[in-house]
Image (cartoon, rainbow, N blue to C red):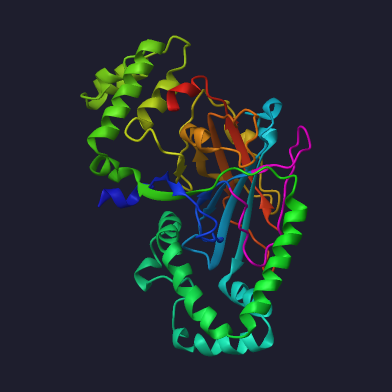
């Protein structure tokens, strides 16, 4: 089918708050806020704002392995919540971290007492033939987008299943491990005391092409309401384009101008109108949806990979609906983090040094939102 040659765009949606007392997230979890869950072999990093020097808050965590790579792979986005830094690219950071399944297993095993290691190995003999990624064979060629989605769908069940046999295998060593874990958490808390935290929510994933079938009447009515509000405020006739096809409709759309002269913003509104609640768009190697006119030399604005010197490619973007979900856990009276869209570009070659324990910084391009209230 022709569809198979087109990049699949995945849409991220908020899927309920994470209760830390009932669920412990991991590097496999796609989530908003909370503390970043780095891969077991990766050193915890707490980037600071390039403008004010304050520690950055963790905004989004995405588990996104590539189909052509044997590595587990995470992207972590951080931002400065200070009002004076809000909306500026210098106050954002994105870290990419990777490691092999063998490294994950080794890190977990080496952290256990000797008796627990032996019991754990004995309990896992039955799964020697299992795939390293913990997925069915038919998923191996699903692609990068599928890796993100499948990882999200199976992460909760996989973690629950793994927890039960491990507890049985640990036996008497469990209490010793719990004490060790608590001491580690205390140590981390001491180093994180100044790091602001946002409330944490799960991110669920759907294909953009499925939205037409999955949206209910209430969501469609909400989308139409947003469009009508936008038309009234900006003097743009987006609605009349919905029924048209072919060149004439497209020509009308391209000639449409908002009162503030930004046709790109009206195109952005039309693109997300079917699912205004989307908080993230993922399409590695695809095209971003700009909120305002991008620089004419955007390819030059996106810097080369700081590790290999190669070009970067678009991977994902954060959407305006995410803003209202970024709530401080400390009941701070500070204003919420504000942005229009944040575009993330990563190394096209996905370069990585085997055995590395430090994440690589990638590139963020931030656009402010002239009408943030439309997405609330």
- Quadrant location of the C terminus? top left
> Any magenta on residue 254?
no
Count all numbered tags in the image, as a single digit.
0
Quadrant of res 82: top right
Q: Is residue 45 magenta?
A: yes
Q: Residue at x 74, y 48 (%)?
A: 193
User: In the picture shown, does residue 212 fall above or below 370?
Assistant: below
Whole-percent x, y for residue 274 in the image: 32, 33
Position of 217 compared to 76: left or right?
left
Q: Is residue 185 left or right of residue 288?
A: right
Which secondary structure is most common in the magenta stretch?
Answer: loop
Relative placement, left or right, of 33 versus 282 is right
Q: Nearer the viewer, residue 152 or 146?
A: 152
Q: Position of residue 227 (x, y in %)?
A: 33, 21
The x and y percentages for residue 248 are: 25, 20
Q: Closest to the observer: 189 or 42?
A: 189
Depth check, front residue: 177 or 350:
177
- x and y percent of residue 194 in the render? 75, 44
Say which residue appears at 46% left-offset and 39% top-offset: 279
In the figure, 359 relative to 287: above or below? Answer: below
Q: Quadrant of residue 208?
A: top left
Residue 160 position (above or below residue 338):
below
Q: Residue at x 39, y 50 (%)?
A: 205
Report whether residue 364 is seen. yes
Above or below, comparing residue 10 to residue 158 in the picture: above
Between 211 and 5, which is closer to the camera in this rendering? Answer: 211
The range drawn in magenta is 34-57
Answer yes or no: is residue 356 visible: no
């Amino acid at each position: 089918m022709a569809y198979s040659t087109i990049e699949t765009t995945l849409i991220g949606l908020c899927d309920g708050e994470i209760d830390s007392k009932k669920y412990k997230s991991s590097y496999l979890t796609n989530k908003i806020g909370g503390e970043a869950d780095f891969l077991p072999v990766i050193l915890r990093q707490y980037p600071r704002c390039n403008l004010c020097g304050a520690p950055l808050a963790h905004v989004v965590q995405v588990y996104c392995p590539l189909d052509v790579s044997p590595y587990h792979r995470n992207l972590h986005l951080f931002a400065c919540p200070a009002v004076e830094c809000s909306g500026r690219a210098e106050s954002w950071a994105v870290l990419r971290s990777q490691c092999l399944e063998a490294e994950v297993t080794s890190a977990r095993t080496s952290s256990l007492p000797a008796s627990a290691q032996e019991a754990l190995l004995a309990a896992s003999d039955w799964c020697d033939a299992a795939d390293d990624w913990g997925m069915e064979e038919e998923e191996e060629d699903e692609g990068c987008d599928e890796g993100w989605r499948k990882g999200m769908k199976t992460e909760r069940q996989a973690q629950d299943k793994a927890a039960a046999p491990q507890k049985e295998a640990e036996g008497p060593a469990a209490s010793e491990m719990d004490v060790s874990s608590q001491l580690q958490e205390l140590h981390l808390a001491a180093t994180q005391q100044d790091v602001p935290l946002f409330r944490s929510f799960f991110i669920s994933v759907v294909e953009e092409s499925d939205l037409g079938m999955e949206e209910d009447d209430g969501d469609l009515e909400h989308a139409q309401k947003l469009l009508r509000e936008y038309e009234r405020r900006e003097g743009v006739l987006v609605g009349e384009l919905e029924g048209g096809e072919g060149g004439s409709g497209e020509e009308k759309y391209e000639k449409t101008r908002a009162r503030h002269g930004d046709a790109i913003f009206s195109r952005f509104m039309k693109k997300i109108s079917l699912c205004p609640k989307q908080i993230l768009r993922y399409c590695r190697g695809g095209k971003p949806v700009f909120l305002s006119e991008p620089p004419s030399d955007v390819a030059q604005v996106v810097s080369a990979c700081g590790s290999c010197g190669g070009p970067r490619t678009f991977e994902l973007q954060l959407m305006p609906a995410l803003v209202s979900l970024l709530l401080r856990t400390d009941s701070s009276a500070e204003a919420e983090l504000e942005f229009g869209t944040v575009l993330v570009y990563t190394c096209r070659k996905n370069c990585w040094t085997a055995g590395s324990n430090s994440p690589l910084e990638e590139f963020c391009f931030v656009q402010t939102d002239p009408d943030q209230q439309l997405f609330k």
